[in-house]
Structure formats: structure tokens, C-alpha cells
Image: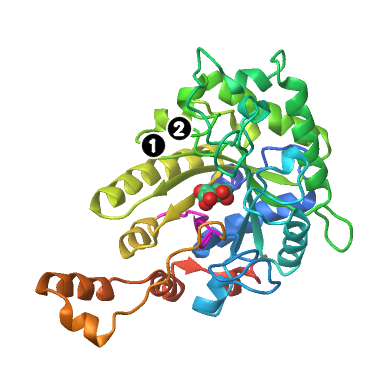
Amino acid sequence: MKKILLTLLCAAAAFALRAQSIQPSDPEATPEARQLLERLDKIRQKGIMYGHQDDLLTGSTWFEVEGNSDTKTATGDFPAIAGCELGELELGFDRSLDSVSFAQIRKMAKWFYERDGILTVSWHVVNPITSQWPGIKEPNGAGSAWEVEMLSADGLNAVRSVLPGGENHALFNSWLDRLAKFFLSWRDSEGKLIPFLFRPYHEHSGSFFWWGRGRCYDEEYAALFRYTVDYLRGRGLHNIIFMYNTDKVYSREDFLRGYPGDAYCDFLSIDWYGSGAEFERNVKNAFDFLSEMAAQRGKLFALSECGPLSDGLQRVLADYKCSYLLTWRNAPPRHPMPQFKAPTAKQLNKMSAEERARYEAFLRMPKPDDLLRALKADPHYLFYEDIKDIR
Ligand code: BMA
């Protein structure tokens, strides 16, 4: 009897273990993609990775300098996750909407992957309707992913226009072809496809991109996501870890509106910018339901965009087996940040008491690099050196 009980217990434990492990959503996932998922599952048992957009491509004072990293300059270490952006690749351009060359992105991806770093990709794909109109095509302006004012689910609907039967369907397929071609060129030294995280049509709970909630119906969004995943998989890209992503959300139902289904993503993620007590309460609420849902569905989860870093956010997130948090790129070269100039002694003397108090409060405020160093010093958070040997 004892023996039977023991056998039953072992079988139950084995089942529970299997049920908990992260299975790829793609049944044909490459061994490298499977290994990445397993690795990600191991890493989150140790801590939360720090990710930084464009970290190895551009920085606050430099552009495409190999080996440079603002994170490394501030902390002595690279981020564990390096982000890159592919907007305007779909148009056949050589450089992204942020002026980063796609050849350099490919090089960086190989360089980081071969050193056991992790890669994540975003895509601010241009508006399929308005990018065809004449007008100024400046980054983030006319024709861009953000040009949405005239779009609505019931009226001019860009998502519907690219789905099968839509007037921009063929055009959109040509964009996906370019994307597939680029991804197929991401190979390691042995010629194997490099596995990476891809977060298409992000922040869709907001209405500021053409795929956003107010611009199409939830079912159309889900169809767009599924169509893209099927298209890329159909091209032999079984190396991609897809991420489903929303902007701020306040409930499980809110998060799941437009969800493409468990067969189409491996990550559940939220982007949320902010700081302060209310922001922390909201993030805690979201990560309570996100972590629960992810466990039930056998998915990983992340705070895939946030900023600024803060003590509060750092504390709140540390309670979860969250894969990573990522801060967005530093000073875009198109809009350089005004450089801070310390006031001279004469200017200080001329300040009113109020101005002086404001200036001193500013000096006491933690600076982004200090916050990054605090994250690096916190054992709950992992940078490149902390993860490179976790296999
Ligand atoms: C946005 C801004 C833009 C940029 C875009 C894509 O959040 O940083 O300037 O073009 O991301 O990287």
C-alpha cells in the first residue's frame, strides 16, 4: 500500500513539475528557442533582469560605436537584455526610424547572442493607410505608427485593411516578407537562427498606435497578431519567442481583450511608465494578476517598458518571478537632451530663497545613473554578468 502511495505521489509531483515548466507556444520551436525559454525560466528563479533599449547601438552621447553601452559606463556591466527597434524596415530602408542601421542591428544581435546576452525586438511599423498618402514622412510624424487621429474601429480601420480581404493586405504581406527576410539573416557563427524575444503591436490597450484599442476591434487585433505569427512561422522562423503586450491595465479582463491565444505567445507583458505611490499600487495590482495568469497558462511575464527607475518600483517588482524590466533608449540623437549646466557662484548668490530651495532639491534628486547603480547593487536584479553563465 505504502509503495503504491509513494508511486502515486511521485507521479503527481512529476506531473506538477511538468505542468509548471514553460512549454514553447510553437510546437516546432528550434532547440535554441527551447533552450532560451528554459534558460529564462531558470533566470527568473534567481532574479529580475535589467533590459535597456538600444543599449548596444546608441547612447546619450554616441551613435553606433561597437562595444559602447551607457549601462556599462554607469554600472561596469551590460544589461542582461538588449533591445532593438525595427520600425521602417518594412519600407525597405537601410536605417530604422531612429536612424540606426539594420546591418548594425544584425551585427549587434550576433555579438550579444554569442556572448550569452538576451535580445528583444520592437517594431513601430508605419501606418498602412496614411504612410501611402503624400505628405511629410518624418519619424514619429505623418504616416508613422503614431498617426492615428483619423482611424477608428468603425471608420478608417488600418488593422482591417491589412487582414486577408483588406485593401492593404498585399502591401502588408510585402512588409512581413521584409521582416522575415531580416530575421532569417540573424544567424550565429554556425549558421543557426538566433533566438530572440519579439513584441509586435505593443501597448495595444492604448489607442496611440494604429493597432491600438480605439482604432480596431479586439478580434481584429487578435487576428493581426495571429496572422503575423503564422506568417513568420510559415517562413521557417521557429526561433522567435513572441510577447503579447499591453499598456496600463487594471484587470485581467482588460489585459486579455484582444489576446491572440496561448498558441501565439510565450510572454505576457505590460509597459507602464510612471513613479510614485499610485503608480506602485497599480503596478502591484497588475503584477498580481499577471503573475497568476502567467503561471496558469505556463507563460513568462515582464515589465517590458518602464521609466524612470525608482526605489518604489524596484521594491514592488522584487516580489514577483518577473523575467525583466526594460527602460527605453537614452537621449534620441534627433532630440538631444539639454545638457545640465551648474550655476556659477554669482548666479547662485542672485537666486531667491525659493529658487535656491528648488535647486537644492534638484541636486538631492537621484539621477538616472544613480538609480541604475542602485538596481545593479540590488541582489533581486540581474545584469549581464549575473546571467551569462546561467544555462
Ligand atoms: C519612442 C520614442 C521615439 C522612437 C520610438 C521607437 O518611444 O523614443 O523617439 O522613435 O520610441 O524607438
Residue 311 locus on image (x, y percent): 32, 65
Tell me the SS state at disc 2: loop
Give the magenta range. 320-332
Taking the view exactly as shown, the residue that stands out farthest to the left is 353
- State which quadrant residue 170 falls in: top right
Could you tell me if residue 113 is visible in this image? yes
Q: In this rendering, would 388 be left or right of 49?
A: right
Residue 52 locus on image (x, y percent): 55, 61
Residue type at mark 1 is Val
Q: In this rendering, would 226 be left or right of 251?
A: right
Task: Give the residue drawn at x 70%, y 66%.
Answer: 116
Q: Is mark 1 within 8 Å of ligand 1?
A: no
* Disc 1 crowd, CA 10 A, few/some/many (<14, 14-19, 20+): many
Tell me the SS state at disc 1: loop
| Label pair 2/1, CB-CB below 8 angstroms | yes
Residue 142 locus on image (x, y percent): 57, 35
